[in-house]
Each structure stands twice: as structure tokens, then as C-alpha cells.
Amino acid sequence: REFFEHYPYRWMKAIEPMAALSVKNDYDCIVKTFGGGKSGQAGAIRLGVARALQEIDYNWRPLMKKAKYLTRDWRMIEPKKTGQHKARKKKPYHKAEHSRPFLLQAPPFDRADGGAVGEERLRLHREDLRGRQERPGGRHPSRRGQGAAGDRLQLAAIDEEGQ
């Protein structure tokens, strides 16, 4: 009783099976609990008392079972996972900019067509890429580490070879 002295509702929860069977003053209980909080310990005492009363008189079992005094609370703390901060908390996900496919990136702004907008601009950009992939080397200059100036030089070299 001293343990739950400041928590009368926890005490009532702990002796609930004895009160339901009207044997509250017939038995003395010495209980030792550890871990968890006050509510969890009161629930553990209630289960232990119900099991002890069942051992004393098995005819009380159906009544206690119907009142769910013999049911263990199965909720437990979820374990922490490897590579995460806690059981459910995960590290923030940052998609790297360079992992995006080049075709989905916005087309360049310095186009000679006067800057088409929306779908038309994307269509022109894809046509431009297809044209670049048909030349020797086959990859877009930005993938080889060249800028726009290197691209213009390569186009000029192709034009000279063709003439």
C-alpha cells in the first residue's frame, strides 16, 4: 500500500481482482515489482494477484477471465534499429542533385530559339540532346566535364570534317 500511497487509482487497479471476488480483506499480499512506470507496475501486480487467486480457487477463473484480469498486456517498447536514430525515427533523406537523369533537368536558358516555354521548350531540349548523342563521342558534353564552350568547339570540328 505504501508504494501506491499517492496514487489511489493505481492501487485500485492493482487489487481489482480481489475486489471483484470480494476477498479484498481475506489475504495479505507482499509484492515486489521493478522496471516500467507506476501504471505498468500496477498492471503487473493485477495480473500476478489474479493468477495467485486462480491458484487458490480454480472456480474463480471464468469470472476473472471474463473481466480480462488474466490477460497479459502484450505492448512492449519497440527496439532501436541499426542505422536509425530510434525505433521509428529515420535519418533525413537527401536525394543527390547529380543522380537526376539529365533528360528530366530543366533545359538551358541560353537557347537561340528565343526561349520557348513549357512542353515546347522541353521538346526542343530533347531534340537537341538526340542530335548531340548522334555525334562521335556520343555523350552530352556536361557528362564529360565539358562546358558549352567545349561543345561549340566540338561542333566546329565536326563541321570542318564534313566540308
Image (cartoon, rainbow, N blue to C red):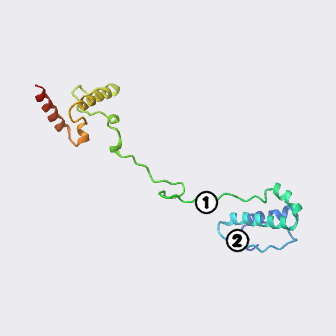
Q: Residue at x 15, y 30 (%)?
A: 158
Q: Callout 2: 10 Å neighbours few (<14), some, many (20+)?
A: few
Q: CA distance from mark 2 to mark 1?
A: 18 Å
Secondary element under disc 1, as helix, strand or loop, is: loop
In what quadrant of the picture does the N terminus appear? bottom right
- Residue 3 image-quadrant placement: bottom right
When the figure is inspected, residue 19 is found, relative to residue 99, above or below; the finding is below
Out of 93 and 142, give the one closest to the viewer: 142
Three-letter amino acid code at disc 2?
A: Thr
Q: Residue at x 87, y 70 (%)?
A: 25
- Tell me: 148 left or right of 20: left
- Tell me: 133 left or right of 118: left
When the figure is inspected, residue 67 is found, relative to residue 101, above or below; the finding is below
- Tell me: 75 left or right of 11: left
Q: Callout 1: 10 Å neighbours few (<14), some, many (20+)?
A: few
- Tell me: 85 left or right of 128: right
The image shows residue 4 at horizontal and vertical percentages of: 73, 70
Residue at label 1? 77
Q: Residue at x 67, y 71 (%)?
A: 34
The image shows residue 137 at horizontal and vertical percentages of: 21, 36
Secondary element under disc 2, as helix, strand or loop, is: loop
Residue at label 2? 33
Out of 155 and 73, give the one closest to the viewer: 155
In what quadrant of the picture does the C terminus appear? top left
Counting residues from the N terminus, which is met first, the one under dot 2 or under dot 1? 2
- Residue 71 image-quadrant placement: bottom right
Three-letter amino acid code at disc 1?
A: Ile
- Residue 20 image-quadrant placement: bottom right
Out of 39 and 58, give the one closest to the viewer: 58
The image shows residue 141 at horizontal and vertical percentages of: 23, 38
Circle count = 2
